[in-house]
Image (tube, helix red, strand yellow):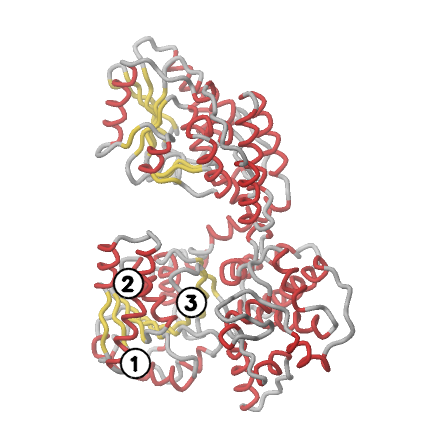
Amino acid sequence: MSVVTIARQGDIATVTVDNPPVNALGLALRQGLWDAVATLDADPAVRAVVLICAGRTFIAGADVTEFGKPPVEPHLPDLVARIEAAEKPWIAAIHGSALGGGFEVALGCRFRVALPEASVGLPEVTLGIIPGAGGTVRTPRLCGVETAVDMATTGKPVRAPKALAAGLIDAVIEGDLLAGAVEFARAAIAQPLPLPVSQRGTAAPEAGFWAEAEASVAKSAKGAVAPLRALAAIRKAAEASFDEAMGFERETFLELRGTEQAAALRAVFFAERAAPRPAALRDVAPLPLKTVAVIGGGTMGAGIIAALRDAGLPVILIERDDEAVARGLANVAKVFDGGVKRGKLSEAHARALKDGVTGTTDYAALADADMVIEAVFEEIGVKRAVFAQLGAVCRPDAVLATNTSYLDPRAIAEGLPNPARFIGLHFFSPANVMKLLEIVPTPETSSATLATGFALGRLLKKIPVQSGICEGFIGNRILKRYRAAAEGLVRKGVPIARIDAAMRGHGLAMGPFEAQDLGGLDIAYLQREGARAAGQDVPETLGDILVRAGRKGQKTGGGWYDYAAGERKPLVSDQVAELLAAEIAPPSAMTEPEIAAALVGEMAAEGQAILDEGIAASPTDIDLVKIHGYGFPRWRGGPMFATRARL
C-alpha cells in the first residue's frame, strides 16, 4: 500500500500521508510527496493542495530507522523546496505533532492550519543536531528571530493557539480538520497569495539581542553544543541571504550529526523509547488500574499521589490518624496549588485534582483498590506492619508495592499472602516531577505484576527501569560509590569546591558535596549508623565527622560548606577544613577534567559490577537511571556510554 494517496474535492486536491506509527519521513514518504508535487502541478483542474496525515499525528519527524545511515535522494531540503516551489499552493493540515522534519515540510507549504491541541516544534537539539531542511532559516522568516531562537535552542514544542499568535500557523481549525482545511484552501486561493516563506524577510532584533541570547543559551545548555549552533544558524538566517543561510544550516547539521554528543543523545533516545515496554513483557498483559491507594502522605507520598492524579487515577490516601490524614491532604494540595501559582494549572483543574483524593485512616477502604503503594518511613518494622494490614484487607489480586530506596523488598514482603502480587516501585523525589521509576521485583513477583509496574510507569509518563535486589538498587548503589570516591579525592588533597566545580563543568547541575548539603548529610549518616548497629563493618567517612559536629547541610547552616542565614550559596568553610585536617593529604594539583573523568569512571565501574551481578539488564538501563534520577548530563549519554571505550 502506498504511503501517499491523492484524492480530489473539486478543485482542491488532498494528499494523505499514511506511514504508521508516526508518519516518519522515510524514503518512501519523501519519494511519494516528491511525486505528488509533479502529479498535481500537471493537473489543470487542481488549484490548491491540502497535505494531511492519517493516524494519530502529522509527520512527526525523521525516520529513526535511518539514523546513522547515508542519506538517500530525494533529500529532505530538496523536498521542502519542491513543495514550496509548487505551482499549486500547498496547505499543511496539522493534528498531533509536526516536529523536526515534519514541521520543515509544513514550512515549505504556503499555509499551515492545525487543530487546537496540535503542536509544532524543532526538537533536533535533543538529538545533538540542528534542523537540516530549513528549520532555522524559514522559521525566523515566519515568526521572527525571538520565537525561532526559543524553538530551535530548547527543542520545546509550541501548541497551536500559541503558534497562531506567533505566526507559525495561519489558522486553528475547530471540528473536522480535513473539511476545515479544504474550506480554508478555497478561501485562501480567492485572495492574493502570500510570498513563500523563503522569500520573506526577517526583522532585525533589538541591539544586544544576540549577545544576551548566546549567554542565556550557553547557561541552559550546560555544555551541550547543539543549542549554541542552532542559535548561530538562526543568526545567519537573519543576517544573510536565504541560500547562504541554508548552506550554513546544512553544513552545521552534517557536522553535528557525526559528533560524540549526537551519538550519545541518539543512544538515550532509543533507550527511552524501549524502556516502557521491555521485550520480555511484550506478550504479558498488565492488570487493570482503575483505583490506586497510597499509604503515607509525607513528601514522597504526596508526590506519588500528585503523579497518579495527573494521570487521571482516583487515589485513596491512608494515614495513621486524622491529624496525619489532614497533613497528607494538605501536602497534596500544596503540590497542585504550586502548579496554579506557576501558571501550569487553572484553579478549576487544581480543584478537580484535589477532589480526586480521598483521605482516611481505615484500611477497609482499600478492599476494592487495584494497586496500593506504600510510602511510609524507611524502617523495616514500620513497612512490614503496613503490609500485614494490606494482606488482611486487600483483594488477593491487588498489586501491593513498596516505595523503598535501600531496604530489601523480600524482607518487607515476608509473610504476605500471595507474594506474586508484590513489587518494589522506587519513585524519586519529587515523585510528580522526577521521571525515573526503578521497578524491583522479588523472586516471587509474577510477570503480570511486573507488567503492571511498567504499565504504571507508562501511565505516569516515567522512564521505568527494572532493577535486581541489592543495597540501593541501581541508582543509589552507584551514588554511594560516587560519593565515596569524591571523599577519597578530598582525602588526597583535592579541594571540595574544585570537585563540585568539576562535576558542574561536566554538565551536572550540582557537585556531590553541594548535593549532599541540599539533601542533608544526616540521611546517609543514619543509614551507616544503622548498619553499624547491626554489626556491619562500615568505615568512618568524612561526612560522619561533619554530622557529629552538628553540620548536617543547608538545614543547619552548614555541611560541607557554610551558608549565610537565608542563603543557599555555598561558602568554603574554615571549620570544615579544621574538622577534616587530620584526614587530608597535602593539596593536590588534579585538574577539573581529571576529577570528572575519575568520578565518572567510578560510576561506570560500579555500573559494570551491577551488570556482572545481573542487577541491571543492560548498560543503557544504567545510563537511564543516572540521567533521569541523578542529573547526569543527557548529552554525554550516561556514565556507561561515556566510558564504554575504556571498560
Q: Which residue is mark 1?
A: 391
Relative to 3, say whether 415 is above or below. Answer: below
Q: Which residue is mark 2?
A: 289
Relative to 18, say whether 410 is above or below. Answer: below
Where is residue 533 drawn, in percent x and y? 54, 91
Q: Earlier in the sequence, mark 3 or mark 1?
A: 1
Q: Are marks 3 and 1 in contact (CB under 8 Å)?
A: no
Q: Which quadrant, please, contains the N terminus?
A: top left
* Badge 2 element: loop
All told, the count of numbered labels is: 3
Residues under labels 2 and 1: Cα distance?
18 Å
Q: Earlier in the sequence, mark 2 or mark 3?
A: 2
Residues under labels 3 and 1: Cα distance?
22 Å
Going by the numbered disc 1, the residue's amino acid type is Gly
Going by the numbered disc 3, the residue's amino acid type is Phe
Q: Which residue is mark 3?
A: 427
Image quadrant of residue 14? top left
Going by the numbered disc 2, the residue's amino acid type is Leu
Closer to us: mark 2 or mark 3?
A: 3
Image quadrant of residue 537? bottom right
* Badge 3 element: strand
